[in-house]
Image (tube, rainbow, N blue to C red):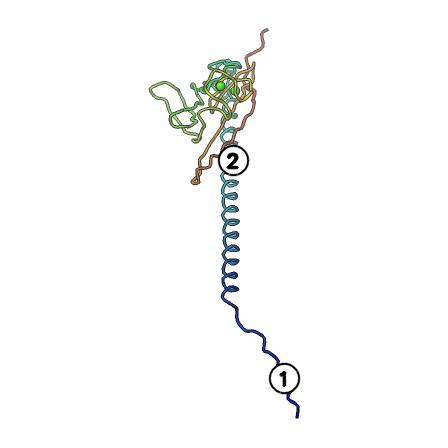
Amino acid sequence: MRRVPRSRSPRSGLTLIELMLAVVLLAIVFAKAHEALTSASKSSGRETREMVLEDQARRVLRQIAYAVMGANRETLIPDTEAPLSTEDLRFQVNLGIQDGEVIWSDPEGVSLEETAAAVFWSQNPGAVDEQRVVWTKLVAPYLAGELPNGMDDNGNGLIDEKGLSFVVDRNSVKISLTLERVGDDGERTVNTVSTTVTCRNLPEPAK
Ligand SMILES: [Ca+2]
Ligand SMILES: [Ca+2]
């Protein structure tokens, strides 16, 4: 009887070189995955910071705008025109009419306090009974792109404007604000907002 030659059984297991190659490939895959996850996490953190800062800047800008809109145009101090600006605007607002007379508020102000990087609203600014409310912190010392050098670095028509700036043009006031924040990763986030409002309480037209 003829014997059928025994076929060689398939090789089982991996050689040492194949094992090492697999380990190296796995290490590369894990490193790439970790790099992608870290990058995605950083990107997500940056986007979140940008959104939070933008929301904060817009909220404060609305607060300032409403305060200035209610002001009596004739009480704005200082009456600053471009290319100059101010970071400390004072005014009085219309509280209503009593016995046919307009009742004006005590002096109010919206200002930048540079040492605290804060914008605050105040009642009776400069007086002994002055009251202050901080509206935001994280205010940049100068508006985005501006440097204290006597020139208009950011091309907005204003020279050396601060992180909060007011410019008066007839009955309108342009308000600009830059907030900045440095994240835990050292990355700086900046947001600038701007609007122009008209004072609702205008001088009586000459008769
Ligand atoms: Ca400028
Ligand atoms: Ca400048």
Q: Between residues 174 and 183, which one lies in front from this camera angle? A: 183
Q: Which class describes the residues within 10 Å of circle 1: few (<14), some (14-19), or many (20+)?
A: few
Disc 1 Cβ-to-ligand 1 distance below 8 Å:
no
Q: Between residues 171 and 140, which one lies in front from this camera angle? A: 140
- The quadrant in which residue 114 appears is top left
Q: Which residue is mark 1?
A: 5
Q: Amino acid at mark 1?
A: Pro
Q: Between residues 11 and 206, which one lies in front from this camera angle? A: 11
Q: Which residue is mark 2?
A: 55
Residue 117 has which mark? none
Left or right: residue 196 versus residue 179 is right
Quadrant holding the N terminus: bottom right
Quadrant holding the C terminus: top right
Q: Which class describes the residues within 10 Å of circle 2: few (<14), some (14-19), or many (20+)?
A: few
Q: Is residue 207 above or below residue 155?
A: above
Q: Earlier in the sequence, mark 2 or mark 1?
A: 1
Give the farthest residue toward the left. 128
Query: Residue at 52% across / 51% down in the picture?
Result: 32
Badge 2 vs badge 1, beta-carbon distance below 8 Å: no
Q: Nearer the viewer, mark 2 or mark 1?
A: 1
Q: Disc 2 versus disc 1: distance between alpha carbons?
A: 81 Å
Query: Residue at 42% across / 40% down in the picture?
Result: 184
Q: Where residue 93 sits: x, y (%)?
A: 48, 20
Dot 1 lies on which element? loop
Q: Where residue 191 sits: x, y (%)?
A: 51, 31
Q: Where residue 14 sits: x, y (%)?
A: 52, 68
Q: Amino acid at mark 2?
A: Asp
Q: Is residue 170 above or below residue 132?
A: above
